[in-house]
Structure formats: C-alpha cells, structure tokens
Image (spheres, helix red, strand yellow):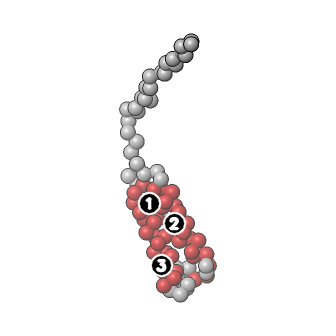
Amino acid sequence: MPKSRVRSKAVYTPPPRSAKAKVSPPWLVPAMLGSLILGLIWIIVFYVSQQSWPIGGIGGWNLVVGFAFVVGGLGLATKWR
C-alpha cells in the first residue's frame, strides 16, 4: 500500500507588537461617567417629578434625551483603554 504524503504546517509567528501602547485621552473617563450619570439623573427626575421636569414643554421626549446621554456614555466607554 502506498504511503500518504505528510503535510508540513507553517510555524505560527505572532504579529509584531506595536512599540507604543494605546492610552485613553484624559477627558474620556470624566466625559463618559458624566454622560452616564447625567442621563440616569435626567430619567429619574423625569419620573419623580410626574413628567413635568427637566424640560416640561417636550413631554415624553425627555426620556429620549436621557437615553441619548446614556447611549453617548456607552459609546465613550467603548473607546476607553
């Protein structure tokens, strides 16, 4: 019976490491935490004030504003290193 050919695998070489480590800008963490906290407080104030605060004229859109701050904070959190 003929002998099957043996495949030789190439040796794995990891990609070269970059010399400089990525660092977050100093404003990122305060902006992220501020946005998350502001959005949470905005939504809480909206519910606790019987939907008359923070901006009474826009009604239910206050929820959209609060969640926009929260989503913005989560977007900033993805940039944190």
Q: Which of marks 3 and 1 is nearer the N terminus?
A: 1
Q: Residue at x 51, y 57 (%)?
A: 75
- Local crowd at mark 1 within 10 Å, few (<14), some, or many (≥20)? many
Q: Earlier in the sequence, mark 3 or mark 2?
A: 3
Q: Which residue is denoted by mark 3 in the rendering? A: 44
Up/down of 14 relative to 7, above or below: below
Give the residue type at disc 2. Answer: Phe
Q: Residue at x 56, y 71 (%)?
A: 65
Q: Which residue is denoted by mark 1 in the rendering? A: 32
Q: Which residue is drawn at 58% across and 83% down?
A: 56
Task: Please state the horizontal and vertical placement of residue 28, each as a whole percent of the image.
Answer: 42, 55
Indicate the quadrant containing the N terminus: top left, top right, bottom left or bottom right.
top right
Q: Residue at x 39, y 45 (%)?
A: 23
What's the distance in space between the residues labelled 3 and 2, CA to CA? 13 Å
Number of numbered discs overlaid on the protein picture: 3
Disc 2 element: helix
Q: Are marks 3 and 1 in contact (CB under 8 Å)?
A: no
Of the pair 24 and 8, the residue shown nearer to us:
8
Q: Which residue is denoted by mark 2 in the rendering? A: 69
Left/right placement of residue 51 relative to residue 15 reads right
Q: Residue 46 carries which label?
A: none
Task: Please state the horizontal and vertical placement of residue 41, each as a whole percent of the image.
Answer: 45, 75
Disc 3 element: helix
Give the residue type at disc 1. Answer: Met
Of the pair 13 and 3, the residue shown nearer to us:
3
Disc 1 element: helix
Task: Please state the horizontal and vertical placement of residue 80, each as a whole percent of the image.
Answer: 42, 51
What's the distance in space between the residues labelled 3 and 1, CA to CA? 19 Å
What's the distance in space between the residues labelled 1 and 2, CA to CA? 9 Å
Which residue in the rendered view is the most extreme toward the bottom?
A: 50
Up/down of 81 relative to 4, above or below: below
